[in-house]
Image (cartoon, coloured by chain):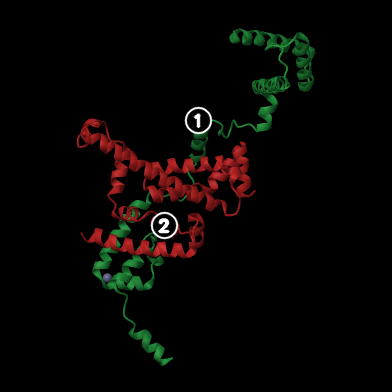
Amino acid sequence: MTDLELLTKMAEGDVSAGRRFVDNHQVNVYNVCYSFLQNEHNAEDVAQEVFIEAIRNAAKFRGDSKLSTWLYRIAVNRSLNFLRDNRKRRFWIEIDSLFGIGGDPGDSKDQGPVSDDDLLEQQEQKLLIGKAIQALPENQRIAFTLNKLEDLPYAEVAEIMQTTLSSVESLIHRARVGLQKRLKNYYSN
Amino acid sequence: MNQLRVKQEIKPAMNCREAELLMVDFIAKQTPSDIPAALSEHLSSCSLCMRLYSNCIIDFKVLAAGRRIAPDPGFFDKLSVRLQSRPGLSIHKRKPVRRILHYSPVFLTAAASVILGIWIGSKWFILTQAGIETSNSLSSEERSGMVEAFASEMQLTDESTLALESYFIENENSDNYDAQ
Ligand SMILES: [Zn+2]
């Protein structure tokens, strides 16, 4: 049974087809999400949303690209949206703190225990390599992540990003130069 | 041929910038055999690049620890639970549209009400457009004619026709009451 048949059956309520489809793709989907989010809990959460979106839009999949390419595209978009929402949330928390609505931001001891996820996130934030990748402009980050971290060929990256091959080459070149400068700067200080 | 050989021999070794760019390319490669020979050579002779490379590799290993190499056996079950909390998206409880249409009496009743409303509205509109200015209420003959016509269109039984007729009368009276 093809991936498309499995997805269609899953959307119709076939549990065993659903399990096979999800197991075929969950590692790749999760890893793409993790590369962008750099947090296991968030990557798991977003990866699940990727499959929900795939089920919801199963009928819309036209089959003019590989199903895995389509899933990767959903994973990238969902991950970037998650990061944007997170940034917005943090911005408003800071604004609230500034005006004393949410308490003093330095008063973290009074804001309840820090969860394992928070600790993990703080720990991951300290990794300079992760910071350097996240500091890249969005399109460069997408192209670099998919090609260098997920090992996808330029042609597939172009298809996921819905752009040309030459554009992907240019994005990856700029990402490499940007990262080289950042890493040198971060690690030599 | 001789010229070529000479050129290869005098080719300068990789400089630090080139080495740094290659490090970026191979950041995700965890085994030394994946690294190009030219980079290994540079690293063995340049302590600055070696330090940068070691830091990058150590950090990347920590970062990559959260990646998966095999499917999580609980992933699908967690997804199923999440799907069940989304209306209309549960893997286990979804019914094809045809089945919903076939079995749901609530759906059928609602659909019949809508069709009845549209049908009455259209008939009423035709009558008023034709200049029939008798009154807002229909005569009993017109009323029973309308009900019979509707019943035959909807293929209803006599019992249903009677029920519909009484429904019409009640509604008509309340409409007249509102108009006063
Ligand atoms: Zn060097």
Q: Which mark is residue A75?
A: none
Q: Which chain is red?
A: A
In what element is the residue under mark 2? helix
**Residue type for callout 2:** Leu
Count the labels in the image: 2
- Name the residue carrying label 2: A149
Give above or below for A7 relative to B36. Answer: above
The chain identifier of the residue carrying mark 2 reads A
**Mark 1 neighbour density, 10 Å: few (under 14) some (14–19) many (20 or more):** few
Q: Which quarter is ligand 1 in?
A: bottom left
In this orientation, does residue A147 appear? yes
Give above or below for A72 relative to B15. Answer: above
Describe residue A117's horizontal placement relative to residue B83 as left or right. left
Give above or below for A18 relative to A173. Answer: above
Point out residue A51 in the picture as x, y percentages from the top left corner: 51, 42
Residue A142 versus residue A146: which sits nearer the camera? A142
The residue under the point 70% across, 20% down is B128
**Residue type for callout 1:** Ser
As measured in the structure, the alpha-carbon distance from the residue carrying label 1 to the one carrying label 2 is 34 Å
The image quadrant of residue A141 is bottom left
**Mark 2 neighbour density, 10 Å: few (under 14) some (14–19) many (20 or more):** some
In what element is the residue under mark 1? loop
- Name the residue carrying label 1: B85
